[in-house]
Image (tube, rainbow, N blue to C red):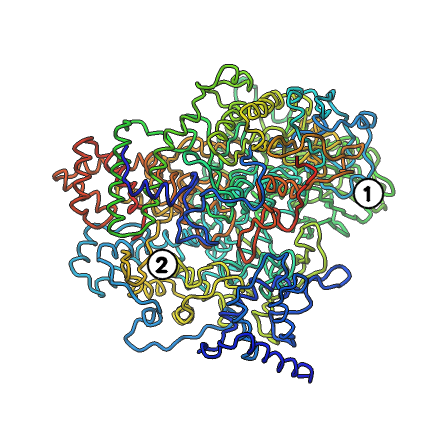
């Protein structure tokens, strides 16, 4: 410390003592930087005095102030405090234009802190959690729960609460009565164990995870078309039911594809980050929206595992948390090196079916000659006539192998037999440039074979994955250049089809000089298609030449797999057969219906597709750039994968790739994930997290109300092998969880009543009325909802409610459309799947009242519920009690029973009675 | 129906909300309480109490309607200079596409000499109320992102829209109707329900859709098979049971729910009353050019006037179908035939009811259309225009705006040459008219204070009366 600094410190002490002379008598504990000072500085000062290291183009710091108040340094605290207490508007801190004013109590705290030595501490969330000692035979939650406990809840309330929490459905009357007759901790523990084993458990908890995963069954944005990713949803349910350790659950979802010998399940798991939206609006730049999806992936990872608001650092270094602009793109780089294919789930039952199909096809093929219509004359005559027309086109083709094959954005790989495979990103205008060595014979014609491949969308041959037909391509121009561009005398193709508009889409459009027209397939996806281009003048022997292929239109539509060959014939046309009798029969218009049947049987059967991640090969990694101000159009320097310094001890090698990153997330090295996870689960039970800001453990987030408890749970979950079921058991067996929710003045804070989540409200109603289907998994279903909900979305889609049991499946299986979500869910605060949600609102609104009373789905439920009662044995009062208890578990009070009885006497309508019952506050509330 | 004195007290005293939803006091951050829908004092002196935003989704052609460029006619058949186009990306056309001249005659109207293309001639009647901003510009060139951007200041879903911010800042003045209403009279919308989402604000600030068909608000009608008497007795029964529960549990959240039910019951009569146009004179119906019962843009405009009279704060009317990629002439004529008369009628009608001074009417799309022609044989398109983010026109009327024409574009109608009004500026100006400093209307989310205008936006004082 320099002399002048020491002097200033001395002066400062006197200044502070003078200002707050009486404080020393009052204070008992040292001021905590983490708990008391940093929140003040973060809220009022860090915006200008924080970690922001942004620089302008000339390298000048963009941080408003030179002085940093977020880390230890040689701050001049005398100057600081003088300016804080200044009344001069030109001098005072924070300056008037910030609209921030420090309270006198806050200023006093800062002064005390300075007086005590101005010690900085690491932000609490970046310090590794430690377990507090807990005496044996004591429930750790209750030992560490600092708030005085209210009395225990009555058995009926408790048993309903724990059922709603663990499986999302109310208990049966029998289970409730048995428990009420002997509400011992042992009996409770037994019920908890049963609930944890129930398949309903995974269905309830998957919903909360899917909020974070921003799961939906449509692509989002304008067109918002359907997507198939329900296998990922089923993976989540299965994993939770199996109590898959959360670390494994994490690694599989972020990098399951990179695990050695990845299983089908682990590949399906990578759908987590395929839940990003896909813009199919005509004319968008697909790479711009890929970038937006990457931004979403970073933000979602930050919220879900780190509890950090990384989003701020997209545009500039975080003003509050130690995440730099570079760190942000370093995080993005972990996720950036992927391809995003469809994955067909292996289905062993299919191979047997396929075998049968092929056998049937073979049989029909053998019978085909017998189907030849007699009125068309002799089969053989027709065959020979046809063959004559085809023979000139059988001339052999010479495969052309390029000496160089390049593309603007995608990458081309030369495979066997001259086949070229395209991978990587595609754009609205892709250009392939292929150089060929000289030929020994003149080239009069060129052939493009567009080839199907399982690696391509819908099996190819094209790479179209949005807006247009999946697997199609659009060859807008096909050019050959020797020393000058060649011209063409003709073209032909084996298949073509136009999508959008009614214009031509045959091979001639690829040589017409119009970039807006082109050869495409439309209906002929998953099959080989051939185009032949005849040159006006041959390429002479000994001449090298170049072929340029342009692809794309108002959407990206590049060819995925192809082969080029040449012919010395000038009039040769595109054919795709050997001239056999079978070939003739299969193409004969007279036999089309028979041939179609055969072709359908020959189709390869595939399991359901789902969206997954796949790491790009080492030789074609995708570079990640820093984007100035976070804008897609402003890429700057290359960035390597890296973690923010604050989260990683220097000197240790950083995680290299996505898999190592995922492993680090759930390693003991990372202080955040375990805390973030247990806190979110705590909030699911108690309505509020120990850290109330579930998605923000940074400087701007809230402090843990019970840090020892949070840390204990965090360490425990890791010690317990990341078992969520053990965590849930630990929480619900505590006295804290079992407190009453009745509010009595003057008694300790009770268990907070919480309005139920939308899905639980619906599922409970279905369950109580006897309608709930227990069918699990598979394609999404459509329950009844009012007319006109979806029509506001693009294309005015209609909602056709499912029939039979599918109408009454658990809500997690409800079809989720992003731009027009299921109305009842929206009304009760469910998200749309457009963004990651850590915490839903719990609003209380007139629209909810209207939904419970009038929505056709609830009317249908009330009617079924009413039918059930009508057919039940017993007196009116017994029936009312039964209905009441099926939904609310506890018996009604005499007053409640009387009110219902009176209503029934007056209206004599069970559906009207059950409707009222379903509309009660208690019916939509966890007590 | 009968109501308990308790719920009445909560309804009038504690929950004084408009509608939308009631916030649960104990659960919301940012100190929002059950009073979050109570009328609140604006930050600065407001000029407008209500906004009617006529959103012409798909983007009308400014070159056909507001910004005559005879120079383009002369240039027809040739491309624009590269220096003009820069590196602008297009949805459909190639940047070197030929230009297309204006498709309509223009005339000047009123003392302000408001210039309007012939399909908008009906607006001539209110020319001197129009504040025509010819120099609007946006960052987005695709529909869904641009519509979201105009509404929420951000091109992706997830942020609160203008109506939600307004409700968050000002609360509601209606006890019987939602404070933020959304109607859609064209086809489906590119931006979907995210256009009226409250984003990260509490869900209570989400816009409530008024739909075509039997029930203007979802489930507002009593279902078939339930008599009015059953309905009323059900409300009564539910209320009594909830009141008993409240007395046992003492959780005021139950009282809030009781108030919700009471308001739901009121809504069951106030919504049909609002939609019932029998009380409107034939003269009024003819002024708008609507049918009393048939869902249309014109009828929605009349309903909007009735909503403003009943204290509704923010009204969106979406009318899609302006996306003239082909036949910009016919397409524009068609859309104007559906909207021009009713827009003029709305302004006149508000004025004669003395409401225009306090009601801001905004008319416009999410971006403009290219000076270049869109022609594409494979898509079957000709004489259309593609998306143009650099320049478009927005109209405003009333609510403290100054009549006149603002801003200029170059001879091609491509770039703005004078008085650029970015979407964030437009948002800042609308908020200003409502009584907000757009830099101080903030909400803490994801680690920082968010606002509608992000870190941008300036109030355009020249647009203020």
Label 2 packing within 10 angstroms: few (<14), some (14-19), many (20+): some
Q: Regarding mark 1 in the picture, which secondary structure is present there? A: loop
Residue drawn at x 27%, y 50% is A170
Asked if both marks, 1 and 2, belong to the same chain, the answer given is yes
Q: Which residue is mark 1?
A: A441
Residue found farthest to the left: A875
Residue found farthest to the top: B282
Q: CA distance from mark 1 to mark 2?
A: 81 Å
Q: Quadrant of residue A679?
A: bottom left
Judged left or right of residue A681, residue A458 is right
Judged left or right of residue A28, residue A534 is right
Chain letter belonging to callout 1: A
Front-lying residue, B179 or A461: B179
Q: Quadrant of residue B214?
A: top left
Does residue B377 appear anywhere in the picture?
A: yes
Residue B131, percent from left and from top: 67, 31
Q: Which circle's residue, 1 or 2, is located before the other in the chain?
A: 1
Front-lying residue, A463 or A298: A298
The number of numbered discs placed on residues in the rendered structure image is 2
In the displayed structure, would residue A151 be above or below residue B47? below
Does residue A604 appear anywhere in the picture?
A: no
Q: Which residue is mark 2?
A: A686
Label at residue A733: none
- Quadrant of the snapshot with the N terminus of chain A: bottom right
Residue found farthest to the right: A483
Front-lying residue, B140 or A457: B140
Q: Are marks 1 and 2 in contact (CB under 8 Å)?
A: no
Residue A259, percent from left and from top: 52, 62
Front-lying residue, A598 or A528: A528
């Amino acid at each position: 410390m320099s002399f002048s600094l020491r002097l200033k410190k001395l002066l400062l002490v006197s200044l502070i003592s003078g200002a707050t002379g009486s404080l020393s008598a009052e204070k008992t504990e040292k001021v905590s930087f983490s708990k008391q000072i940093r929140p003040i500085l973060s809220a009022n000062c860090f915006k200008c005095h924080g970690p922001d290291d942004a620089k302008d183009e000339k390298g000048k710091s963009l941080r408003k102030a030179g002085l940093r108040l977020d880390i230890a340094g040689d701050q001049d605290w005398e100057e600081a405090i003088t300016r804080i207490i200044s009344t001069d508007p030109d001098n005072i801190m924070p300056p008037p234009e910030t609209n921030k004013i420090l309270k006198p109590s806050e200023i006093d705290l800062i002064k005390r802190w300075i007086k005590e030595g101005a010690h900085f501490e690491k932000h609490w969330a970046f310090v590794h959690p430690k377990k507090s000692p807990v005496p044996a035979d004591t429930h750790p939650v209750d030992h560490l729960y600092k708030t005085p406990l209210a009395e225990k809840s009555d058995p009926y309330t408790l048993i309903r609460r724990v059922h709603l929490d663990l499986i999302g459905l109310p208990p049966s009357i029998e289970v409730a009565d048995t428990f009420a007759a002997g509400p011992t901790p042992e009996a409770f523990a037994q019920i908890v164990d049963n609930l944890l084993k129930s398949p309903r458990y995974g269905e309830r908890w998957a919903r909360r995870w899917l909020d974070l995963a921003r799961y939906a069954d449509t692509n989002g944005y304008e067109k918002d078309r359907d997507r198939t990713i329900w296998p990922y949803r089923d993976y989540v349910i299965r994993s939770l039911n199996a109590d898959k350790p959360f670390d494994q659950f994490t690694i599989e979802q972020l990098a399951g594809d990179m695990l050695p010998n990845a299983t089908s399940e682990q590949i399906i798991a990578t759908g987590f980050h395929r839940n990003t939206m896909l813009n199919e609006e005509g004319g968008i730049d697909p790479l711009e929206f890929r970038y937006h999806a990457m931004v979403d992936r970073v933000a979602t990872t930050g919220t879900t595992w780190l509890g950090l608001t990384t989003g701020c650092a997209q545009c500039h270094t975080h003003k509050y948390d130690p995440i730099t602009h570079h760190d942000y793109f370093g995080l993005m780089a972990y996720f950036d090196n992927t391809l995003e294919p469809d994955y067909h789930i292996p289905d062993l039952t299919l191979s047997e079916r396929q075998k049968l199909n092929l056998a049937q096809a073979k049989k029909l093929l053998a019978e085909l000659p017998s189907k030849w219509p007699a009125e068309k004359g002799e089969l053989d005559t027709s065959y020979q006539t046809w063959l004559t027309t085809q023979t000139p086109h059988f001339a052999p083709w010479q495969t052309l192998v390029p000496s160089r094959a390049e593309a603007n954005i995608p990458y081309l790989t030369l495979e066997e037999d001259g086949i070229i495979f395209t991978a990587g990103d595609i754009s609205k205008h892709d250009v392939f440039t292929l150089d060929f060595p000289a030929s020994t014979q003149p080239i009069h014609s060129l052939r493009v074979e567009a080839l199907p491949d399982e690696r391509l969308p819908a099996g190819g041959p094209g790479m179209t994955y949005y807006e247009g037909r999946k697997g199609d391509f659009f060859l807008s121009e096909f050019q050959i250049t020797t020393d000058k561009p060649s011209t063409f005398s003709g073209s032909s193709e084996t298949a073509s089809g136009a999508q959008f508009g009614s214009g031509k889409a045959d091979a001639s459009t690829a040589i017409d000089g119009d970039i807006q027209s082109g050869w495409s397939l439309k209906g002929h996806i998953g099959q080989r298609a051939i185009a032949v281009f005849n040159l006006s003048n041959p390429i002479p022997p000994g001449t090298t030449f170049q072929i340029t292929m342009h692809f794309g239109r108002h959407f990206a539509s590049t060819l995925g797999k192809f082969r080029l060959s040449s012919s010395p014939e000038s009039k040769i046309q595109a054919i795709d057969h050997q001239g056999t009798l079978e070939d003739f029969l299969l193409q004969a218009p007279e036999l089309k219906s028979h041939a179609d049947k055969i072709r359908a049987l020959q189709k390869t059967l595939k399991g359901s597709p789902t969206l997954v991640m796949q790491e790009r090969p080492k030789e074609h990694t995708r570079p990640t750039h820093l984007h100035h101000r976070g804008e897609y159009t402003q890429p700057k320097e290359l960035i390597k994968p890296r973690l923010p310094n604050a989260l990683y001890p220097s000197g240790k090698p950083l995680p290299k790739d996505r898999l190592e990153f995922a492993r680090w997330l759930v390693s003991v090295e990372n202080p955040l994930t375990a805390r973030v996870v247990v806190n979110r689960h705590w909030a699911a039970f108690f309505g509020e997290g120990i850290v109330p800001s579930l998605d923000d453990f940074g400087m701007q987030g809230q402090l843990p109300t019970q840090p020892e408890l949070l840390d204990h749970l965090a360490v425990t979950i890791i010690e317990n092998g990341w078992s969520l079921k053990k965590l849930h058991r630990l929480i619900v067996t505590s006295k804290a969880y079992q407190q009453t929710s009745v509010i009595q003045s003057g008694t300790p804070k009770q268990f907070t009543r919480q309005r139920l989540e939308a899905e639980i409200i619906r599922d409970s109603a279905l369950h109580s009325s006897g309608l709930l289907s227990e069918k699990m998994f598979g394609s999404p279903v459509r329950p009844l909802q009012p007319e006109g909900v979806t029509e506001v979305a693009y294309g005015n889609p209609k909602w056709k409610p499912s029939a039979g049991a599918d109408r009454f499946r658990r809500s997690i299986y409800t079809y989720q459309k992003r731009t027009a979500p299921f109305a009842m869910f929206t009304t009760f605060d469910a998200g749309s799947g457009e963004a990651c949600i850590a915490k839903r609102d719990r609003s209380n609104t007139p629209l909810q009242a209207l939904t419970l009373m009038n929505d056709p789905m609830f009317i249908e439920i009330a009617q079924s519920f009413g039918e059930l009662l009508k057919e039940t044995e017993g007196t009116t009062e017994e029936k009312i009690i039964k209905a009441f208890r099926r939904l609310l578990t506890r018996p009604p009070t005499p007053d409640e029973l009387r009110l219902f009885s009176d209503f029934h006497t007056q209206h004599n309508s069970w559906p009207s009675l059950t409707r009222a019952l379903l509309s009660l506050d208690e019916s939509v509330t966890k007590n | 129906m009968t109501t308990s004195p308790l719920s009445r007290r909560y309804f009038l005293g504690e929950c004084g909300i408009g509608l939308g939803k009631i916030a649960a006091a104990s659960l919301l951050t940012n100190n929002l309480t059950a009073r979050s829908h109570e009328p609140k004092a604006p930050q600065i002196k407001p000029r407008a109490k209500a906004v009617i935003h006529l959103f012409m989704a798909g983007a009308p052609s400014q070159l056909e309607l507001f910004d005559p460029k005879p120079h383009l006619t002369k240039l027809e058949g040739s491309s624009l200079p590269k220096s003009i186009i820069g590196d602008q990306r297009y949805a459909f056309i190639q940047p070197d596409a030929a230009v297309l001249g204006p498709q309509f005659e223009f005339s000047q109207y009123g003392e302000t000499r408001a210039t309007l293309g012939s399909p908008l001639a009906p607006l001539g009647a209110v020319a001197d109320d129009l504040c025509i901003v010819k120099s609007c510009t946006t960052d987005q060139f695709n529909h869904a992102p641009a519509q979201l951007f105009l509404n929420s200041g951000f091109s992706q879903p997830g942020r609160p829209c203008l109506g939600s911010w307004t409700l968050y800042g000002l609360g509601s003045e209606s006890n019987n109707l939602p404070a933020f209403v959304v109607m859609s009279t064209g086809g489906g919308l590119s931006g979907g329900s995210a256009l009226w989402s409250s984003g990260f604000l509490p869900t209570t600030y989400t816009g409530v859709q008024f739909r075509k068909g039997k029930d203007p608000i979802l489930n507002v009608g009593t279902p078939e098979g339930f008599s009015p008497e059953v309905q009323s007795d059900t409300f009564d029964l539910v209320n009594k049971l909830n009141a008993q529960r409240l007395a046992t549990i003492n959780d005021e959240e139950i009282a809030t729910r009781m108030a919700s039910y009471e308001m739901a019951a009121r809504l069951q009569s106030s919504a049909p009353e609002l939609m019932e146009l029998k009380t409107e004179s034939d003269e009024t119906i003819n002024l708008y050019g609507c049918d009393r019962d048939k869902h249309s843009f014109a009828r929605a405009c009349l309903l909007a006037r009735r909503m403003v009279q009943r204290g509704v704060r923010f009204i969106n009317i979406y009318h899609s179908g302006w996306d003239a990629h082909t036949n910009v002439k016919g397409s524009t004529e068609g859309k104007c035939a559906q909207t021009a008369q009713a827009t003029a009628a709305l302004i006149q009608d508000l004025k004669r009811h003395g409401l225009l001074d306090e009601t801001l009417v905004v008319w416009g799309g999410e971006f403009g259309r290219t000076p270049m022609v869109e022609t594409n044989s494979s898509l079957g398109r000709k004489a259309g225009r593609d998306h143009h983010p650099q320049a478009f026109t927005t109209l405003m009327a009333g609510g403290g705006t100054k009549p006149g024409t603002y801003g200029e574009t170059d001879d091609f109608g491509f770039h703005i040459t004078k008085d650029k009004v970015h979407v964030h500026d437009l948002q800042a100006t609308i908020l200003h008219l409502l009584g907000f400093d757009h830099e101080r209307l903030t909400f803490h989310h994801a680690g920082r204070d968010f606002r509608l205008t992000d870190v941008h936006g300036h109030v355009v004082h020249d647009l203020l009366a």
